Amino acid sequence: MRLTPIPADKFTFGLWTVGNRGRDPFGEFVRPPLDPVRAVHRLAELGAWGVNFHDNDLVPIDATASDRDRIVRDFRKALDATGMTVPMATTNLFTDPVFKDGAFTSHDANVRAYALQKTMHAMDLGVELGARTYVFWGGREGAEVDAAKDPVEAIKRFRHAINFLCEYARDQKYGLRFALEAKPNEPRGDIYFATTASYLAFIPTLDYPDTVGVNPEVAHEQMAGLNFYHVVAQAIEAGKLFHIDLNDQKPGRFDQDLRFASESMKSLFFVVKLLEESGYDGPRHFDAHAYRTEDEQGVWDFACGCMRTYLILREKARQFRDHPGIQSLLSEIHEPGTGAEGAYSPERAGELKARSFDRQALASRRLPYERLDQMVVDLLLGV
Amino acid sequence: MRLTPIPADKFTFGLWTVGNRGRDPFGEFVRPPLDPVRAVHRLAELGAWGVNFHDNDLVPIDATASDRDRIVRDFRKALDATGMTVPMATTNLFTDPVFKDGAFTSHDANVRAYALQKTMHAMDLGVELGARTYVFWGGREGAEVDAAKDPVEAIKRFRHAINFLCEYARDQKYGLRFALEAKPNEPRGDIYFATTASYLAFIPTLDYPDTVGVNPEVAHEQMAGLNFYHVVAQAIEAGKLFHIDLNDQKPGRFDQDLRFASESMKSLFFVVKLLEESGYDGPRHFDAHAYRTEDEQGVWDFACGCMRTYLILREKARQFRDHPGIQSLLSEIHEPGTGAEGAYSPERAGELKARSFDRQALASRRLPYERLDQMVVDLLLGV
Amino acid sequence: MRLTPIPADKFTFGLWTVGNRGRDPFGEFVRPPLDPVRAVHRLAELGAWGVNFHDNDLVPIDATASDRDRIVRDFRKALDATGMTVPMATTNLFTDPVFKDGAFTSHDANVRAYALQKTMHAMDLGVELGARTYVFWGGREGAEVDAAKDPVEAIKRFRHAINFLCEYARDQKYGLRFALEAKPNEPRGDIYFATTASYLAFIPTLDYPDTVGVNPEVAHEQMAGLNFYHVVAQAIEAGKLFHIDLNDQKPGRFDQDLRFASESMKSLFFVVKLLEESGYDGPRHFDAHAYRTEDEQGVWDFACGCMRTYLILREKARQFRDHPGIQSLLSEIHEPGTGAEGAYSPERAGELKARSFDRQALASRRLPYERLDQMVVDLLLGV
Amino acid sequence: MRLTPIPADKFTFGLWTVGNRGRDPFGEFVRPPLDPVRAVHRLAELGAWGVNFHDNDLVPIDATASDRDRIVRDFRKALDATGMTVPMATTNLFTDPVFKDGAFTSHDANVRAYALQKTMHAMDLGVELGARTYVFWGGREGAEVDAAKDPVEAIKRFRHAINFLCEYARDQKYGLRFALEAKPNEPRGDIYFATTASYLAFIPTLDYPDTVGVNPEVAHEQMAGLNFYHVVAQAIEAGKLFHIDLNDQKPGRFDQDLRFASESMKSLFFVVKLLEESGYDGPRHFDAHAYRTEDEQGVWDFACGCMRTYLILREKARQFRDHPGIQSLLSEIHEPGTGAEGAYSPERAGELKARSFDRQALASRRLPYERLDQMVVDLLLGV
């Protein structure tokens, strides 16, 4: 079992994750700023494949053109030196007070226009540095006061923005795929498109649905108590898993962004298994950060831990596949009956309606799920 | 302000709601069975427009053909006598042990076949009694043990069933619309298609997407802490609000099915407002039940309370529209800027990228949401 | 119905509440600092009775002695000019990085010593300005990593600190009462003493239990989905409601600190009713803040709204008491049986064990709670 | 590592746990009744130490005296034959409709009297079969309608009942210890004494506080999102952990009663570690049940799984203690500073107030919690 990451594992980190400085609603920064160049070098040393960023993770919102050029040049040099990639980029549409009531869904058309402008520039920057996927997280697209905003109108405004930006990407021949990222609340009381499924439902209504998918995040779905494995499964079944944000979270509380699988080992084991077995070949992106109690060394411990636990769970997924006891139980459980498959025909409907079923016999079929689940627990606990 | 319901208000109740006998995981029945005929008469007296049912709310699962005929005859007589309608019907695919591990998503093809059969018969029954909408709630389509079931396969099985039944309805010229109802958990540890949005995402993948919509339920979304107003808004924006289940629920706990708006007055005020102003003209269906502490008289108190509070909130929605202070604030808030609308063109993108924005000026725009929200609180509290 | 607050209503605000500048985990400040002197004047004009503060709300952590003196002098002048009181003070033991892993429960005895020092100075400051109640909120007393800290040891450390500070207050003849404030999580993954009840259980183990009570906060209990009315009732029954933090919160999510009763109207109606009828004569303290979308004018709107809604609910509590329909139902519900009261005696136990009960008759007693609750809904909605 | 349970492990099961028949709010029984005699024999074969029961798990509520005698005789014979113990007993005060609005807190004094009677008889039965601990779970002591019941009065009624029953136990020289079990909701909308801490706070107000402790249950605290390890720690620190209910639960949803540690491996690892290291020598009681999809064989799989996972986690607790990397990190983390310990004296307070602290130096202390937590993850995953 190899537990040391290599680039082929496709592990990526946001600059904002290792660069997180530990400020929270009740406390100040505890760590100094982390130079993006340093982040690239350290992550490369640790075995990561790439880094991602919001525009302002790299280039401050008020940078001059020459600042920007210098920053990008230094950053590219670090990428070149390390072989690190930038598979994904995104826009910060939430930190600046201008977005206090939304970006693409703001009441103020000037703010919406500025959000489009900022995103086009950020797309230019991302593509310049190699990004193939562009993420949208609408952190301020929501409300505390439902009287103030019409959620139907908010959807239309968001659609307009995504359509506009799809056209821009096509026009520029950027070859980008877009990935929409949902969150139920925080920082807004309620955020529009609260779950990944909300975006899956939204995508078919776009002008270019084929180039738009989703970027589900563990913590965001678990905040609502949802089963993240099921969420990812629906995205995969729809052919829409374009990116994924791996971290961890206790349900029903503030956004924790914990080290990957540090809490939800069993649930995230199934997610890793699904990613590995489904043919998903995109980045394994960690969107989390070190505890506020850590210094910079702890940040790298955190990064190593994310990758290490992924590799452990990937190995356990292989063990699951090769486990005679588990596979034998699964065969027993999946033993097929007959009669439900096949396309509709009037004859088939008629036959089915007339058929006789022994409900009690069907109900008494043994489903040894306690035994199966205990085998999974044993496998996870390494017994 | 009329607070006495009339049929034109389109209030409906499930037979299972007023017929709920108060059993729960820790206690036995407290109320005797309620004859469906009596339910129809009492609800008609109280001003309801219709009743809905699962097949087995009306006809027991083990009824003989002649039992069935007698029951249906008596029930129709009650409908005729009272003028009550049956706008919606559905299938019970959860009570019998045969469905212990799912109906349409069961591993056992015989169970899946039986579920199709049972649903076709239930559709026949529903249509015979006038139903125009057919609801699917997959109460057992889920898992406690994610090792045992592949959630991708579960989606495919569910799709097969819905496609098959759409064909059946077309074949029979039933003119039915289907409405899919989501729930995150209970009775299963996790239910597939956990939220209304999951179904909105699923519908475009069906063979007959136009005839399939959703049936959002207040309690089911609030169990996951989601904003039900936003959920309904997305369904309406997608043209998919085919039915609605009105009740109430405290977030993050067991399914309570409380009297409509008895807890979430403010949130459900916005839902009523949206239903009334969006052109939704379907039933206002109450899917709730009386407290277990009640006897039959309390059941009718419960039913009256659901309708009464809806009418109160509808009236308050009118007051909102006519409230000079609220409308004046809304005008101030919605005052348009310029520059975000309009279709994409390379020129427009270029112009937008070059435009200069004063972020601080935009950020300093006043948004008097505390004042607006307090006006809503005043309006709700009748001050 | 008077809806304009007056000092006799005993409404108080923390300097940190109206002074909240709208920073959150995803966004920067949106409002400039608010001078405490201005806060006192504005709150006085609006009808408040007093202000409360953390030491560093008034005096920056790095202020010089002469800075401190000037600030205190100016602040006292504002109090004198307006007649405003300072009924409560508290210590900021969470903002500075020194407290990143706790104050009284830190592993580092130096940090614990500094926390004691800081609190003694803050008590001096609070008492100097008139405080009679001293609140402890241990915002950093918790953990993300349970391997790192022993929660049993944490309790002992916290007890040591409170005992020490009780002695200090006695020694100084400060006449202070202490009020402990619980919170389940945020900013820590889990905070020790997660609920008000945890502190109620802790108090009897202190050296001076009589001088220590609790300061329950709406949002903190509702984050855990608990019924705040029940929480306050237990504190009152125990004689331990020394202070209260009024605001609002949707359950199961980040700490929102919403305007009082802007969401949970029904639940907080019962809280107001309980406060008014229980003889609680302490401050009605609002620990909340304006939405991040607001400017300073919105802050005062927010403050007015908190007080206004309290007064509305207080009036409704009076209406409840005078409502013939409600009171008649309550009489019916509370009609006593006999046989459970009275002290134990062997004879009584023997008599009780031999007595014959008609379970079915007892079970069939009518409890018209749907009707009663609907009357409350009507009363709240002003119908 | 021994993973086969033996009686010295003190594993116990409620008759209601292995006897659970799989009924839920949406479905009927799936398993036939399980004879208590058979339960005793099977559990003994599997290595359990004892069984616990509610009165009506063993003796139906409407049994005749001779039925009772026969049942008890047969049950005792099974205990004698197997060497199984009955360490704990309790009363069913929730299933029968007579308790629909509470038992000890009912408005109806006759119901309260009947609840006392039923409990005295159940105590007699429990003691007759060897019980040393008597549990109280007030499943119906709560409300959906806060207008109907005064929560202050409810506490007083509950206190009266516990005091009365303490006297009865003393009078009978039963030598029983009482253990109070909390739950936040379900089956009631809100249950009084919502958390274990509520009971810890209540106990000091009783007439015989020394004989009353708590019985915390994993699922009940996790329903409210609380950290169960912290809950148990407070109970232990207070000397009040008289019994414990081990199972598992996903937060923020209906009461799942899952197989022990099948979800919350990390959190329950710390609980096992705490139980083993704290000197707790009471039963390790599993209050859970098999999935509804199981037949009787699955029930025994479930029971084996509970015990097996406990033993695995116990072994991992030993490994934690012997793990050089973990212990070395803990030494580093716990390295003491000075200056916070010791009793209060005016001199000490004066010295402390005058002392100079270097906040930045203290804040910069390294706390390698990411590394430590990853070591725990590795240990749990068996790497």
Image (cartoon, coloured by chain):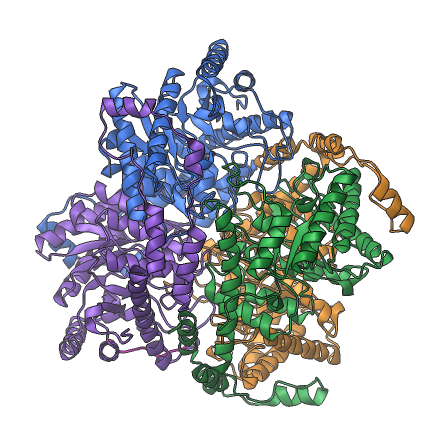
Chain colours: A blue, B purple, C green, D orange
Q: Is residue A159 visible?
A: yes
Residue farthest along the right direction in this orientation: D347
Taking the magenta stretch, the answer to whether it contains residue C338 is no
C29 or C207: which is nearer to us? Answer: C29
> Please, is residue B187 above or below residue D118 in the view?
above
Identity of the residue drawn at 47% across and 67% down: C266
Residue A96: image x %, image y %? 46, 34
Asked if residue A173 lies left or right of residue C104, the reply is left
The part of the image, by quadrant, that contains residue D216 is: bottom right
Q: Bounds of the magenta span?
A: B30-37
Residue farthest along the front direction in this orientation: C81
Quarter of the image with the N terminus of chain B in it = bottom left
B256 or D329: which is nearer to us? Answer: B256
Identity of the residue drawn at 68% across and 46% down: C58
Residue C152: image x %, image y %? 73, 50
Residue C313: image x %, image y %? 50, 69
The part of the image, by quadrant, that contains residue D173 is: bottom right
Quarter of the image with the C terminus of chain B in it = bottom left
Q: Is residue C137 visible?
A: no
Identity of the residue drawn at 42% across and 62% down: B377
Asked if residue D84 lies left or right of residue A375, the reply is right
> Please, is residue C170 above or below residue D372 in the view?
below
Asked if residue C375 lies left or right of residue A209, the reply is right
Magenta part, dominant SS: loop
Residue A127: image x %, image y %? 36, 18
Asked if residue A59 lies left or right of residue D181, the reply is left
